[in-house]
Image: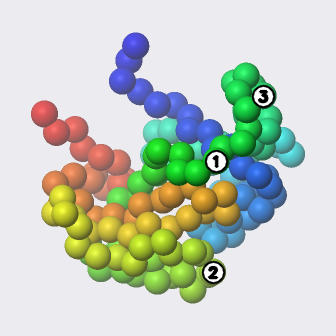
Amino acid sequence: MEQRITIITLGVKNLQRSKDFYQNILGWQPLDSSSEGIVFFQLNGIQLALFPQESLADDAGLPADGKGFRGFSLAHNVGSEKEVDALVASLEEKGVRVLKQPEKVFWGGYSSYIADPDDNLWEIAYNPFLPLDEKGNTASIH
């Protein structure tokens, strides 16, 4: 299997509320392939999909309870500590729940955590060890 992710799908409790968060708070534009039943956003080389939690669980043949910490976070890396501070402050002004204010972290970077409407964790981070290209993509380190 190739080392590749093409789509990350988040099971959401309220599709319209989640679409509003990603579109109106984060400022992302849905793709034309979105419908009343699923929303797609083009990211750096992959897509993020929002899909009703019950439907996603049914598709996978699993219960939809989704209790507790899900064991993952999504990360949005930026180019400096100041960019982390500015982005988190902007999101907080828009009513986004900040779970952890920006701070220096044990691994040598600087990060904060926010939650989307379904409590999916988003880390807003500056990682001095992870170079980003001009488009914000991670550069391969060998």
Q: Nearer the viewer, residue 68 or 56?
A: 68
Q: Position of residue 28 (x, y in %)?
A: 61, 60
Real-space CA distance between mark 3 and mark 1, rounded to the nearest whole angstrom: 16 Å
Q: Residue at x 59, y 75 (%)?
A: 96
Residue beneath disc 3: 58
Q: Quadrant of residue 14?
A: bottom right
Quarter occupied by the N terminus: top left
Which comes before the other along the chain, label 3 or label 2? 3
Q: Nearer the viewer, residue 94 or 41?
A: 94
Residue beneath disc 2: 95
Residue beneath disc 1: 67
Q: Position of residue 37 (x, y in %)?
A: 83, 41
Identify the secondary structure beneath mark 1: loop
Q: Position of residue 50 (x, y in %)?
A: 69, 46
Real-space CA distance between mark 3 and mark 2, rounded to the nearest whole angstrom: 32 Å
- Which amino acid, by three-letter code, is at mark 2? Gly
Tell me, yes or no, if residue 105 can be seen here: yes
Q: Nearer the viewer, mark 1 or mark 2?
A: 1
In the displayed image of the protein, which residue is found farthest to the right? 36
Real-space CA distance between mark 1 and mark 2, rounded to the nearest whole angstrom: 24 Å
Identify the secondary structure beneath mark 2: loop
Image-based side of 124 in relation to 64, left or right? left
Identify the secondary structure beneath mark 3: helix
Image-based side of 16 in relation to 99, left or right? right
In the displayed image of the protein, which residue is found farthest to the top? 1
